[in-house]
């Protein structure tokens, strides 16, 4: 091994530890749920994206098992080379119906959906106008594109600031195409994008809109169809990204839009062109998860009931939840070292809830990010609330 590389890695990791930015994963030893076994300890899990509890739903599990018997465990090829099975095609058709769009193209993940779509629809004659708090996958997707995009050049607007967005739109009318891109739900703050205002501005200034609905999928809109459904903007949002890894409980991501968009991405979306297709049991499990979402309102009702109780209870205890509007509920701490100490104290009290620190959020904006879900019982959340009270006393 190269001594210089190993020395640099060791020194860089120590620097992360010294700045209280170092991360290491705990090992889950049970199915995903509200209470789990992790690193040999039974804990209430408040760090899962399994919003609706579908990751271990019996119908979803059964669909995966039956697909293994029918299709095997792998597609055996990249989608366009020969890895597209009937079950993949059915999943995309079902998702298109669910989203009320012409077509959907599935990728292996939400991150790859962004990195596949954004560069494919932009040229060096175009500009991207992005919310400053957009997810890292959006930022990386934009950086991979040849379009103009730099905060220093004024193409990033202040978070949810529509006046700032309009100023940028007025100043960029010389570009061939202009993409406005935003998260539907912002993953670290839990607030919702002002999508109606964004769409109105886009239509006024001849721009097009892409919304990343990773944390709105299964959470907002009819049956969890996302922010376009939530705001009744069908037909007015050009590109929608959805995830299959959070509320649907499995893995993957997709781009929803026009038939022409899908056709173009099949030909120019690099992660699609160079990645083996999702295993067929994943596609089958996702179809079953969609069936549950569309026909059983109880998981979504329970998700929002739990989120409401959790937010109100934290607020009553004096915790700052940073204006969250969705089940994503940050508890503001500020200092990175204090946030990591808070995480450790919660763990000792039997609650797994991660400290979120730089670079995921800005320096001085550290928080404990909590994720109540349909999989939590009232007893789970009451237990977690008591743990938060005790942890605050420990780290004060």
Image (tube, grey):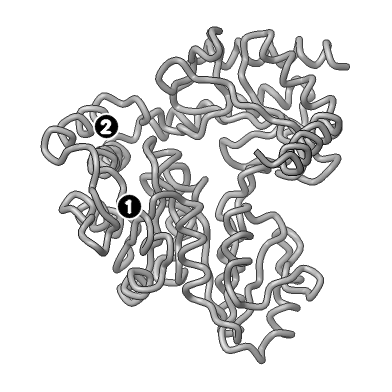
Picture quadrant of residue 130: bottom right
Q: Which residue is found at the position 71% from the left and 68% from the top? A: 162
Instruction: Please name whichever residue, 305 or 216, is drawn nearer the observer in this view of the structure.
Output: 216
Picture quadrant of residue 368: top right
The N terminus lies in quadrant: top right
Residue 333 appears in the rendering: no
Report the residue marked by disc 2: 60
Label 1 vs 2, first from the N-terminus: 2
For numbered disc 1, what is the local secondary structure?
Answer: loop
Q: Where does the image place residue 166, in percent across and percent down from the top left?
A: 71, 76
Q: Which residue is found at the position 84% from the left and 27% from the top? A: 337
Q: Where does the image place residue 10, in percent across and percent down from the top left?
A: 76, 34
Q: Nearer the viewer, mark 1 or mark 2?
A: 1
Picture quadrant of residue 307: top right
Q: Which mark is residue 276?
A: 1
323 lies left or right of 117? right
For the residues labelled 1 and 2, the Cα–Cα distance comes to: 22 Å
Q: Where does the image place residue 281, in percent across and percent down from the top left?
A: 24, 38
């Amino acid at each position: 091994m190269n001594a210089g590389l190993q020395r640099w890695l060791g020194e860089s990791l120590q620097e992360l530890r010294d700045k209280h930015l170092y991360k290491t994963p705990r090992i889950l030893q049970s199915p995903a749920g509200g209470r789990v076994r992790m690193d040999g300890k039974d804990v209430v899990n408040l760090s899962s994206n399994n919003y609706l509890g579908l990751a271990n739903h019996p119908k979803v599990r059964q669909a995966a098992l039956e697909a293994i018997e029918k299709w095997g465990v792998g597609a055996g090829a990249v989608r366009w080379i020969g890895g597209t099975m009937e079950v993949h095609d059915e999943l995309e058709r079902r998702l298109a119906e669910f989203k009320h769009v012409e077509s959907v193209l599935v990728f292996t993940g939400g991150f790859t959906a962004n990195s596949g779509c954004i560069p494919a629809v932009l040229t060096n004659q175009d500009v991207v106008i992005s919310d400053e708090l957009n997810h890292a996958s959006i930022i990386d997707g934009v950086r991979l594109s040849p379009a103009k995009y730099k905060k220093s050049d004024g193409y990033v607007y202040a978070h949810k600031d529509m006046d700032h967005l309009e100023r940028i739109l007025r100043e960029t009318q010389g570009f061939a195409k202009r993409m406005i891109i935003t998260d539907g739900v912002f993953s670290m703050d839990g607030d919702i994008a002002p999508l109606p205002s964004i769409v109105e501005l886009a239509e006024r200034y001849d721009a097009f809109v892409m919304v990343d609905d990773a944390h709105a999928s299964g959470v907002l809109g009819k049956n969890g169809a996302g922010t376009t459904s939530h705001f009744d903007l069908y037909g007015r949002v050009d590109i929608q990204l959805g995830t299959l890894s959070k509320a649907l409980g499995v893995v993957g991501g997709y781009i929803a839009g026009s038939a022409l968009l899908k056709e173009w991405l099949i030909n120019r979306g690099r992660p699609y062109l160079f990645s083996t297709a999702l295993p067929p049991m994943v596609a089958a499990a996702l179809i079953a998860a969609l069936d549950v979402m569309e026909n059983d309102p109880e998981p979504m009702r329970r998700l929002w009931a739990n989120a409401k109780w959790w937010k109100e209870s934290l607020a009553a205890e004096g915790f700052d939840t940073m204006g969250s509007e969705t089940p994503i509920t940050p508890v503001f701490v500020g200092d990175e070292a204090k946030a990591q100490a808070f995480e450790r104290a919660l763990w000792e009290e039997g609650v797994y809830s991660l400290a979120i620190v730089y670079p995921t959020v800005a320096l001085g904006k550290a928080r404990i990010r909590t994720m109540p879900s349909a999989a939590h019982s009232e007893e789970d959340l009451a237990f977690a609330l008591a743990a938060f009270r005790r942890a605050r006393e420990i780290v004060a």
